[in-house]
Amino acid sequence: MHRALMLLCLLAASLPARATEVLELLDFRLVDGRGTPVRQVQRLVSHDGVIVQIDDAGHAPQTGPGTRSTRIALDGAWVMPGLIDTHVHVARFPDTRARAEAILRSAVRGGVTGVRDLGGDARALADLERAIASGELVAPALVFSAMFGGPDVFRQGPTAQMAKDRTPGDVPWARRIDPGSDVRQFVAEAKGSGSTNVKLYGDLTASQAQAIIAEATRQGLTTTAHATVFPARPSDLVEAGIGSLSHAAYLVWEAIDTVPDDYSQRTAAPWKRIAPDHPALLALYRRMAERGTTLDATLYVYRAMQDYPGMPKMAWTDDAAVWGEQATRHAAAAGVRVTAGTDWFEPRDDTDLPHTHAELALLVENAGFTPMQAIVAGTRHGAIALGREATQGTIEVGKSTDLLVLDADPTIDIHNTTRIRFTVRRGRIVDP
């Protein structure tokens, strides 16, 4: 055994060392993702995908003969953190693995450097996460979820397509919850599938939701839920400690005396009757801010749902869109951290950008955000929602070198996030 170990050590010593990668960006305007004013930066240094120096902050490492260095003069361009989309579905299509990889490759070219998948085939997602972590695939950092819901939610629609050749609802990443379910075991199996987030979908009572959230938190997973999971209402989820609520339009059910126990009733909400600043909702927004619950507003999907491929025309989406935008405005005013989630992430064709840019524009144009507030929503707040704030979301020494280099100022016009010169993902240049 000792001889074998010595041979392995000698073999490792004889292999070529991994080349050190250094990237220097010179002369640019910094939008750091924290909401602070834009400032001029002369030099940013990245070492093996981590920011090590910004002007006088931090220090550049000593480099040796094996160092691969790239120096780019940006001539006054704007640099902001790469975007983070907190609500994507990339792994529930035919040919799941290949399709998901294509979507993610396109996303990073379009300026997105982090995503949270909220319901897909964990087998493909785990393989993609491994490829991204190893550097084999240049794509956004990936957080993916196990979905928990009542028996009916896996019978039809997209949720019935999350486990090819298996039974949706009976796999670790798509789990049917019944009154006698062993939640502790289900969460452990979800974690074993590679999921680091648990999503509560629908047809769950307040007590079931509370048990799932508590157990997921105990086992170190983050949690997300649709804003109402029928019959559990938004405040039930917030008090149970949910990390994120998705779909601002579904917050309306907080002001309804009795919430249906059927998730399919979500489209029958009284958006025209209940004001987004109803006292019950104002109290909810305040409580979300106090508890640190982020809001994954998904404004884009309601505006675009009339054009969603294969979907019939749905008049209710217009009411949901207007109501959700105003609810997002009030939630942000109460101090809730709003994130940029699309729910329809992938572009319509290969020449389009991810819809994350459209979500940012809606936050500004329809929900009253300033461009800077929208940028923070799409960067720092997204990292917080994903549990990645220590490594992503802002441009600071010690954070991953995930950058969006722009030819125009996004703090003046939010549409300028589409004026992409190139993306940087973990220190590697990605052309648009």
Image: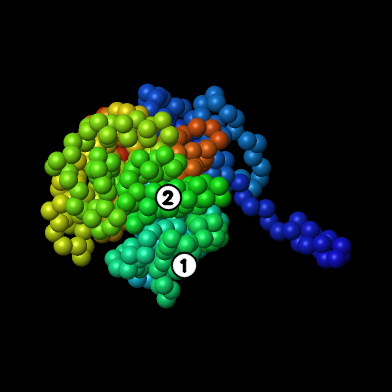
Task: State the separation of the CA atoms marked 2 and 1.
Answer: 22 Å
Q: Quadrant of residue 283?
A: top left
Q: Which amino acid lies under the numbered mark 1 shown in the image of this protein?
A: Val
Q: Can see residue 361?
A: no
Q: Secondary structure at mark 1?
A: strand
Determine whether, in the image, residue 238 is placed left or right of residue 331.
right
In depth, the one of 196 and 97 nearer the eye is 196
Residue positioned most to the bottom: 165
- Measured along the vertical axis of the image, is residue 232 above or below residue 381? below
In this picture, residue 348 sits left or right of residue 60:
left
Q: Nearer the viewer, residue 263 or 75?
A: 263
Q: Considering only vertical position in the picture, is 217 above or below 305?
A: above
Report the residue at 54% width, 44% height from top. 49
Tell me where residue 410 appears, x and y as whole percent: 30, 34
Element assignment for label 2? helix
Give percent across and percent down for residue 255: 25, 39
Q: Quadrant of residue 333?
A: top left
Q: Residue at x 67, y 53 (%)?
A: 17
Q: From the viewer's perspective, is residue 291 above or below residue 112?
A: above
Image spot of residue 421 (x, y percent):
35, 43
Amino acid residing under circle 2: Ser
Q: Along the polypeptide, which appears first: circle 2 or circle 1?
A: 1
Q: 10 Å neighbourhood of mark 2: few (<14), some, or many (≥20)?
A: few
Query: Going 25% across and 58% down the picture, which residue do you hit?
Result: 264
| Quadrant occupied by the N terminus | bottom right
**Residue 207: mark in rendering:** 2
Instruction: Name the residue beneath numbered marker 1.
Output: 171
Q: How is the image coloured?
A: rainbow
